[in-house]
Each structure stands twice: as C-alpha cells, then as structure tokens.
Image (cartoon, rainbow, N blue to C red):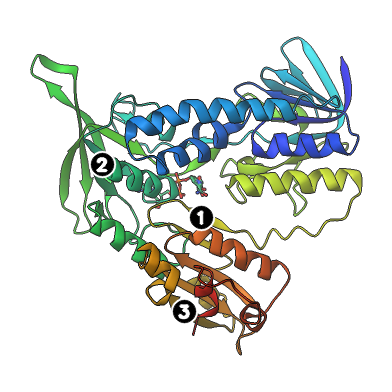
Amino acid sequence: MTTTDLIIIGAGPGGYKAAAHAAKHGLKVAIIEEGHVGGTCLNVGCIPTKTYVHSDTFEDARERMTTVVPQLRQGVEGILSHPNITLVRGKASFVDAQSVCVGDEQYTAQNIIIATGSDSKLIPVSGIDSPEVVDSTGLLNLDKLPQRLCIIGAGVIGMEFASVFNRFGSEVTVIEFLKECLPALDSDIAKRLRKQMEKEGITFNMQCGVKSLSPIPSPVGEGNFSGEGCLVQFENKKGQTESIEADVVLVATGRKPRTEGLNLEAAGITLAPNGTIPVDSDFQIVNCKSSNCKCFAIGDVNGKQMLAHAAEMQGIHVVNRILGIEDNIRFDVMPAAIFTSPEAACVGPSEDQLKEAGTAFECHKAFYRANGKALAMGETEGMVKLCTEPGEGRILSAHIFGAHAADLVQEVTAYMNLGATLQQLRDTVHIHPTLSEVLIEVN
Ligand code: NAI
C-alpha cells in the first residue's frame, strides 16, 4: 500500500495541471492514467482539431497531427516527472473514500481528485453502430477524406468539423434538432456564423431529427456493407421524412461524464440523474455518504463547464483549497471559443439570458468592416457585441464573431475579471491598427 498526500484520477488538462500545482507546493501526488497523458484535449480534442484548422489539406492536417500530439504528450510527461509526482499507469477503482486500487496496488490519501473527463454521447437511433458512423475521435482517425460528410448536431464539435472538412473539399451536410446552431452562444452571433458557413457551401437542416442510419446495401446482398456510405433518414420541421447519402456520418450530439469502472459506490459517492458527479462551488463532491470524504471532481466529469481551461482552473482551485491558499479565480467569467472559420467566442451571459433573468443592461455593437486592420487583412466579416450595465457601466458579457474572436474575447475577459466598465475599456489606449480597436468602436 502506498500513502500519499493527493491522488488524482485522470491526467487530462484538469488532472495534470492540478498535479503540477500541488507538487510545486510540496504535496506528494499519485496521478493515475489508463490511457495517454493529456486527455481528450491533447490526444483527440482541442489540439488535433487545431492542426486541422491550421492546415490547407486533409493530408497536411493528418501529418501535422501525428507530430504535434506526441510532442505535446512528451511535454506533459516531462511535467509529471517532478520528484513529488508518481505517474501510475492503469485503471483506478475506489476501495473507500480515501483509497483506490490500480491492479494489485492500493493508494491511500487524505484528498482525492476525480478528473476522468467525458466520452461522446451517442443517440439511440438504429444503425448508430454502423462502420460509417463515427464520433469526433473516429473522424480524426480517418485516413481518407470523405467526399460526403453528414454531421449530426450543430454544437461546438459539429460546427468546428463542418468548417474544416468543408474547407478540405468534403460536401458537408449538418442535421440539427434545434432552430439555431450552438445553443450555448448568443443567438445573434450563432445565426451570423451559420449564415456565413452556408455561404461557404455547408448545408444546414435545422429543426430536424435523425430517424435512422443505414449502410447503403451492396449489390451482393443485404447485410453486406458495401463501404459505399450510409443513408441518413431524418424528419424535417414539417414532419416529412427526408434522406441523404453520406460516406461518413459524424455524431456530435454532446458528451457524457466518464465514471464507468470507478466503483464510486465504495466511496459513498452517488451520481446525479444526468450522470455527472455533483460538486459544491469549490468542486468538493456533495452527496458523498462517507463522513471522511475529501473527494473532489473537476472538469467534464462534474458537467459544470465542459472546457479544457475550465478543468485546469478548477484543478488549481481545488489544490489551493487543500493547501489553504486563497485565490480569486472567477468561475463566473468563463470565456469560450469555437474555432470555425471565422471564429466565434464569448464570455458571460448571452443577450437572451440577460433578458430572461430580468437584468438591466444595454447592448453595444461594432462591425469588423469599419476596422482598418480587418480591411487590410481581408477579414471584414465580423461583429462585436458587448452587453453592459446601463450607462456604459460594468461589462456583463462579450459575444464576437469574426477573425481572432477568441483573442478579442480574452481581452474583454481581463476587464470583466476586474469588474471594469465599458468606459474603462474605452479609456485604455489600443494599438493602431489592430482588430482589438473594434472593442472601443462599439456604439
Ligand atoms: P454540444 O452540446 O455543444 O452540441 C450538441 C448539439 O447536438 C446540440 O446543438 C443539440 O441540439 C444537438 N443534438 C442532440 N441530439 C440530436 C439529434 N438526435 N439530432 C440532431 N441534433 C441533435 O455538444 P458537442 O458539440 O458534442 O460538444 C461536446 C462538449 O465539448 C461541449 O460541452 C463543448 O463545449 C465541448 N467542446 C468545446 C470545444 C471548444 O471549446 N472549442 C471544442 C469541442 C468540444
């Protein structure tokens, strides 16, 4: 049996950042990982998809992915080689609220952090297990560009892949349940982004529900996959059945927390009905039946904010709490970006959410087409929307669509983190000519 100060299950962005932070402050850490270090983000998520976004062809993207991912993985292994950290390879399973086993070895600690991430959530339709139907990991593993790609779900994953595969030359069709794409985004921005992507050749079928997926029968007889594609049947908004053919179908209908095999019952931990591990505002597990439970859940597995950077900051906050260090991390100011072409990004509540909550606010807008740098770059398609308290008061949120939207939102995030007003943003000197001048040009 090994006794340590902190056990972390999962070496994704949440887990490995927490381990590094704890080790730096003198805690002895055992971090347990059954797959590659770096988690979904580094191996099959944010990083590989960014190699796709920044490559001209599918072949270049695949090649860059195979060099960038191992390089970053090595970097994480380097971080985890800290003398205070033991990287344990294998699957962790709880023994009680303070112990886990990995194979025959048992590890015990006062504090345990669960950072196991999430898996793709598949939809219950017939044919979902056909070989032509893949999740985002399967799509990244394709060695040939599909001529016709059908994407189910116009959320973050669906929209990012629609954008890159369209640019590579695939014929992309998206099928989405809701009226608008990207349900978490300001609807004004989401609509503009969808319209722009439509102009670039992507077909969107909104308010449509997929009914079945079936391999196109080969001429040699039923039940033999021809490798010729998949027939996607869906019901359109008028209730009529339509169908399209695709070589590959990407299912991007959300992700679910990964808790299988953790034996959470042994620690007295009960899942919420939606499968997440419920936590308090400091990410300590709330419905643990064990009296000596000092267990925390960070990242996708707690379902709060399914973003790599949210997981990282949650992990740092938990370690600070264990060490008794005060921090001022504002989890209510959580920026997010969608790396489509053009990008979209946001921080804070959407205009619709502010209206629903009955918050007094005003809306300020500016357009890229009036910005010198955007014109010079040939990136005139874009808009900034800032929601503030009345009278150009405190900035409540930012919603941006256009080139480098993520960087612009990051600037606004800094202001919001410090509780700054629009007037304070306007009073800050901005370099000319830059895209960030759009922020101070809002009316
Ligand atoms: P999502 O929750 O963003 O979107 C899923 C979409 O699928 C929704 O629009 C939903 O209405 C639709 N849908 C669900 N069932 C459907 C059905 N049967 N037929 C048609 N449409 C259906 O989930 P997504 O895109 O899979 O992403 C998962 C998580 O990963 C999200 O929390 C996302 O924030 C995160 N992520 C973040 C990235 C980023 O920050 N850039 C990149 C990739 C993922």
Q: Is residue 30 left or right of residue 370?
A: right
How many residues crowd mark 2 within 10 Å: few (<14), some (14–19), many (20+)? some
In this orientation, which residue lies closer to the viewer: 259 or 408? Answer: 408
**Where does label 2 land, which residue?**
211
Q: In terms of sequence position, does the residue under pointer 1 or pointer 3 come before the other? A: 1
* Dots 3, 2 in contact, CB < 8 A: no
**Where does label 1 land, which residue?**
337
**Where does label 3 land, which residue?**
365
Q: Is residue 369 left or right of residue 72?
A: left
The reply to whether residue 293 is in sight is: no
* Dots 2, 1 in contact, CB < 8 A: no
Q: Residue at x 44, y 59 (%)?
A: 183
Name the kind of residue labelled 2 in the image. Answer: Lys
In this orientation, which residue lies closer to the viewer: 349 or 76? Answer: 76
Q: In terms of sequence position, does the residue under pointer 2 or pointer 1 come before the other? A: 2
Question: The N terminus lies in which quarter of the figure?
Answer: top right
Residue at the extreme top: 104
Residue at the extreme bottom: 391
Image height check: is 402 above or below 15? below
Image height check: is 39 above or below 225? below
Badge 1 element: strand
Q: Residue at x 27, y 52 (%)?
A: 208
Residue 380 locus on image (x, y percent): 36, 68
Ligand 1 near label 1 (Cβ, under 8 Å)? yes
Ligand 1 near label 2 (Cβ, under 8 Å)? no
Residue at the extreme left: 219
How many residues crowd mark 1 within 10 Å: few (<14), some (14–19), many (20+)? many
Q: In terms of sequence position, does the residue under pointer 3 or pointer 2 come before the other? A: 2
In this orientation, which residue lies closer to the viewer: 406 or 13? Answer: 406
Badge 3 element: strand
Mark-to-mark CA distance, 1 and 3: 19 Å
